[in-house]
Amino acid sequence: MIRKFFLTVSLVLLCTIILTGGFFYYKKQKNRNNEFTIWTIQLKPVAQEIIEKNISYFKQVHPQIKVVWVDIPIAEAQKRTLAAILGKNPPDLINLNPDFSLILAQRGALEYFSEKESERFIPSTVEMLKYKGKIFALPFYATSSITLYNKEILNSCGYLTPPKTYEELAQIAQNLKNCSGIYPLAINLNENDSLAKILNKYGINSFENEEEIKKAVFVYSMFNDLYKKNLISKDTLTINHREMAEKYMSKNALFVVLGSNFLNMVKENAPEIYLKSDVCEQLKPKEGKYDISLMNLIIPKYAKNKALAHEFANLLTDDKTQLELAKLTNVIPTNKETLEDEYFSQCEENLAAKARCMGIEQLKNSGNKDFGVQNKKEINEAINKTAEKIILDPNITKEGIEKEVRALAKKIREFRA
């Protein structure tokens, strides 16, 4: 009898534990479903006001939803995103770059967007965000590099107009160095896909024919020659964009190709250099196209609130928000209606306005036919390693450069197969 009593009590306790645990699990899941999370990349403090205003509006529309905004340093973005996705506990909406977003799309880790959602954007930006015909991200904002240069030094060296191509700059680089004593160009050839983009500008995107191989030999030879003659800095293969700007601000470089969003940095940190500066179109080959950089918005496949994520992504990319973001940060909107605003036709004689107008024209005439979606990371690494072998070898011959380029071409063809 006593044994039966204890057995009954034990069963009751076990059921109570199971039911209580289930209740708390349900409550936890319900709370998570009522929490909408967005991750952005280094938008604080510059765009904080805009994001918070959109969050405030979103909460008015969805008062039952708690919105959590996390702003991540660019160096941690990929690592943290990957960890969250692998753990099947990602945020609902993430601001990333297209290359890493594409890798996630290839692995089936992303939600897709509809053609209707993409209609508001510049078509070329949407095409950059497609995998197997499906849209894996929405364009958030773009930057199109411009050439920033010290007009006072250039003019004092006898040149009234800046060079427009890499070749033109290479031809006068020695004269500029002799005259000014500083590097003619600050450039990063080994950061992410910097060199790959330069090759793309020359129409090199497959290495599948002799014409592309000859062009690549020319590009690598040109930078090897500039490096060997000390006309580009010794940290060319390790420097990043911020360090390039710092080199320009410290009067250690005459020309630098940067996103127009760096102009504010120069203005605030080196006002005396800013006053002596001017801007022109980004350096490229004579017949080449301009390149652009894009930031996008993705929704992970395991996001808890996909419908809300679509809604918030559309809110961040509507014409009003895009205009505010452009005015505050000097980035280029991807929304077609935003670009029709008179703000983008007013090219006053100040660097920010000139750069803005140049960037928009370059966006309209961009050519982003790159090496494709297959093994993009490995292709970039191969391109960069070839640059190290060629540029760092002061004794390499033209035949040696061609040998390295042909070896690179073979690798890239294998990666693309």
Image: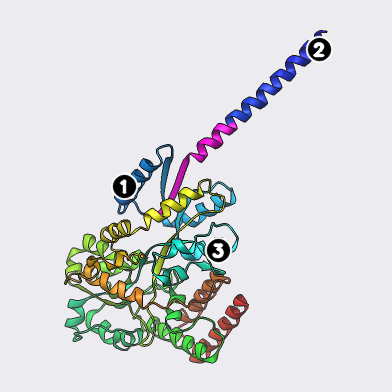
Of the image marks 3 and 2, the number of the one nearer the N terminus: 2
The residue wearing badge 1 is 53
Percent coordinates x, y for residue 120 in the rendering = 39, 64
User: SS for tag 1?
Assistant: helix
Percent coordinates x, y for residue 377 in the rendering = 54, 69
Q: Is residue 133 magenta?
A: no
Question: Which residue is at 34% across, 71% downward?
Answer: 144
Percent coordinates x, y for residue 240 in the rendering = 39, 66
Q: Are the residues tagged 3 and 2 within 8 Å (C-beta)?
A: no
| Spatial separation of the CA atoms under disc 2 and disc 1 | 64 Å
Question: Which residue is at 60% across, 59% downward?
Answer: 108
Q: Which residues are magenta?
A: 25-42
Number of marks drawn: 3
Mark 1 residue type: Lys
Question: Which residue is at 28% across, 57% downward?
Answer: 324
Percent coordinates x, y for residue 162 in the rendering = 25, 82
Between circles 3 and 2, the one closer to the viewer is: 2
The residue wearing badge 2 is 4
Badge 3 crowding class, 10 Å Cα cut-off, few under 14, some 14 to 19, many 20 or more, is some
The residue wearing badge 3 is 103
Mark 2 residue type: Lys
| Spatial separation of the CA atoms under disc 3 and disc 1 | 32 Å
